[in-house]
Image: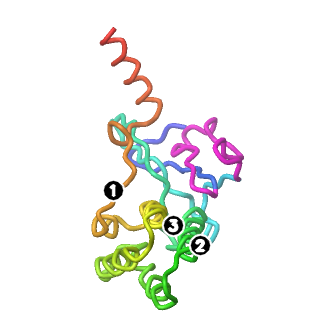
Amino acid sequence: MHRRGDWYDVMQVCVNGHQITDCADSQPESRQKFCKDCGAKTIDACLHCSSKVRGHHHLEGVSDYSTYPAPRYCIECGEPYPWQVSAIDNLKEVLKESELSAQDLQELDKALPDILRDTPKTESASLKMKRIFGKMGKPLYEVAMKVVTDIASETAKKTLGLKEHERPFGLLHPCLFACFHESIKTCFQ
């Protein structure tokens, strides 16, 4: 498939959030019915509105080997994708394991929507979460913060002092990273 101009490809992701490909239309051979990492079914469209999951941004005349992370929300209807729903449910289950008071849990539940998306209340909601999380024991705190890192908005992560999981050399496509890594090894032999 060769299109002219700038266009977005389609991303295929398993329902647990593992990206299969961000070029499902232009490279259909990269599609999979099930995830190689967890065995879950894969999707390439929103389960609510059937809009395709936005993938790689093709720019005419530009070779770009970047990968794009799986989006958390549909850009057409705003509903969360299944992996975001599962991650939110996971955080709620982790919080139930804590010894937080019912009032603390209620405050977190109220703050959560503003932590998941960038809103005018994101910073205050994040500070509230940080204050309440400080009441948890260290092992549970670490697990809860890891989950929050995966689901929170960028503003919430910054307010909480968290960083996105980083891949060496930015977001290089895994195939390009492997080629780059091999060429570096050859240079130093």
Q: Which mark is residue 74?
A: 3
Query: Which residue is disc 2 drawn over?
Result: 93
Colour style of the rendered protein structure: rainbow
Res 188 → quadrant: top left
Q: Which residues are magenta?
A: 15-40
Q: Residue at position x 43%, y 43% from top?
A: 67
Label 3 or label 1, whichever comes before in sequence order: 3
Q: Quadrant of residue 45?
A: bottom right
Q: Could you say which quadrant of the image residue 5 lies in? A: top left
Task: Mark 2: give few (<14), some (14-19) or many (20+) Cα within 10 Å.
Answer: few
Spatial CA span between label 3 and label 1: 23 Å
**Viewer-proximal residue, 184 or 33?**
184
The dot on residue 28 is: none
Q: Earlier in the sequence, mark 3 or mark 2?
A: 3
Which quadrant: the N terminus? top right
Amino acid beneath label 1: Lys
Magenta stretch encompasses residue 36 = yes
Question: Residue at 36% of width from left, 12% of height from top?
Answer: 186
Whether tag 3 and tag 2 are in contact, CB under 8 A, the answer is: no
**What is the distance, in whole Å, between disc 1 and disc 2 at their CAs?**
23 Å
Residue 163 got which mark? 1
Q: Nearer the viewer, residue 102 or 116?
A: 102
**Residue 18, x across and y down, in percent:** 57, 50
Residue at the limit of the structure toward the front, as seen here? 137
Name the residue: 70% across, 52% down.
40
Q: How many neighbours does mark 1 have within 10 angstroms: few (below 14), some (14-19), or many (20 or more)? A: few
